[in-house]
Image: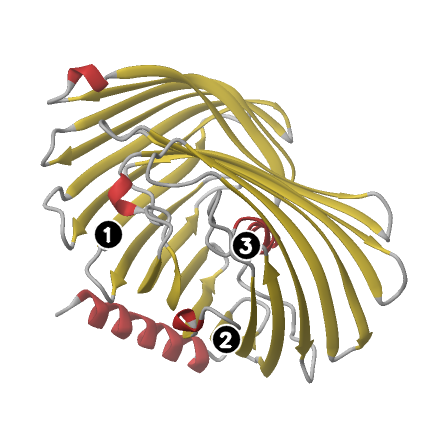
Amino acid sequence: MKLNDIFTAWVSLFLIVLLASPAFSAQKQFTPLVTITDEYTDNFNHSKNNKDDEFSTRYQAILSFEVIDKQNSLLIEYSPNYIDYMDKNEYDSWNHGVSIDAVLQPSKNTILTFSDSFDRSLNRTVRTNTFEQHDTNTSTASLRQQFGQNDYFSLSYTYTFDNYDTPNQDEFKTHRPSAYMMYWFTPKFGMDLNASYSKTDYEISTNDLQTLQEDLRFLKKINPHLDAYVKYAHTYTEQTGGDHVVYNPSIGFDWQPTEDSGIALGGGVLFQEYQNNSDADSKRFFLEFDAYKNFNFSRRNTLSITGSSSYNDINEEAASLGFTINYRAGFLHTYRLTRRLSSELRGSYNLSEYDEPGLNRKDKTLNLGAGLVWSPLRWLNFNFAYTFTDFNTDDSALDDYQEHSAFISTTFTPQEPMHIRPSTPRQVLENRLFN
């Protein structure tokens, strides 16, 4: 049986149980939404010297079906859109997105979740900055079991693929089972353990990967919201071109004032060893952080910040570029000028280091923007926004560039959604800042 069939059967069973549950005295809602966006860019080619300005119009619909009760939820969303360029007609395209998010809580201490996100689109690739038509999909099934006041474990399985209409080096599929456990030996001392195994197969390259990742933290509770930690992370990647091992000891703190906000900040040394290429072995300081916080200065004035660092055997946006170290941070400031008019200021910075031997590429992207959101009616919104982008890379095949872009969008929705979404506020913020 193909894995896709397994996932289809799994989610079908999940939804049957979800909808048939006697406890599911549900609210049900279908919400259509239509958005028309006119956009201008002064550098369509993302080039330093070969700049072309361009206008485009995007017609997008979002069809959402939600079923919600106190403990369970289901969201199915389909989002087709069509992009029409004024001069670059060869890039006119239909794009489609489908997502399913389901949460089932069969008991007080047990939570089952399933999510699947599929996207078919024509967009630029990170590796070559050219437009490619491709399909991406990520499916995740997980179980979380609470077995103490602050003790729990979770199991999950993720399947991801990226398929291109034209054979491409970035085409891959990955299977990744993983497990996590948080356990407190005493009220003051605890540990958490994270482990995963992944198998990545490339469509063109024969350098398939098998990766084992694990990290262990010992925790000391300073106060109810602040923990200090000592951590060790280990990654072993078996690959045709030579096995790759990463050792990463670190020390830091984890401050969590509320359930959905806080900052984990630490530092350590990242050691890398390559089996067949000792010249590529390295050690470097690695700053690990994971931060998200909302500041509500007043009913009108709010600021949200987010940031994280990570490293992985592949970057799913450019799988062929191999081992990647990534830092990113961003903010969104909103101020309600009147009851129906708000202003926005936003910024983001992303540093991606593709540290594979023989590559050593580094990309830096800065985005700054401002906008106005006007809601003259409950079912009608206008969004006016401007963005400045500054991109720098040391890849000789690509250009550094700057881009100024602006758009005006009009959104129609006949009713307000129930606003109980599987996506967290942080996910919504990061989608706006980084995607």
Say which amino acid is labelled 1: Thr
Crowding at mark 2 (Cα within 10 Å: few <14, some 14-19, many 20+): some
Position of 256 with respect to 90 (left or right) is right
Q: Which residue is mark 1?
A: 174
Residue 84 badge: 2
* Precedes in sequence: disc 3 or disc 1: 1
Comparing labels 2 and 3, the label whose residue is closer to the camera: 2
Say which amino acid is labelled 2: Asp
- The part of the image, by quadrant, that contains residue 249 is top left
- The part of the image, by quadrant, that contains residue 215 is top left
Say which amino acid is labelled 3: Asn
- How far is disc 2 from disc 3 in space, using C-alphas? 23 Å
Q: Which residue is mark 3?
A: 431
Callout 1: SS: strand
* Precedes in sequence: disc 2 or disc 3: 2
Q: Position of residue 78 (x, y in %)?
A: 46, 77
Position of 154 with respect to 224 (left or right) is left
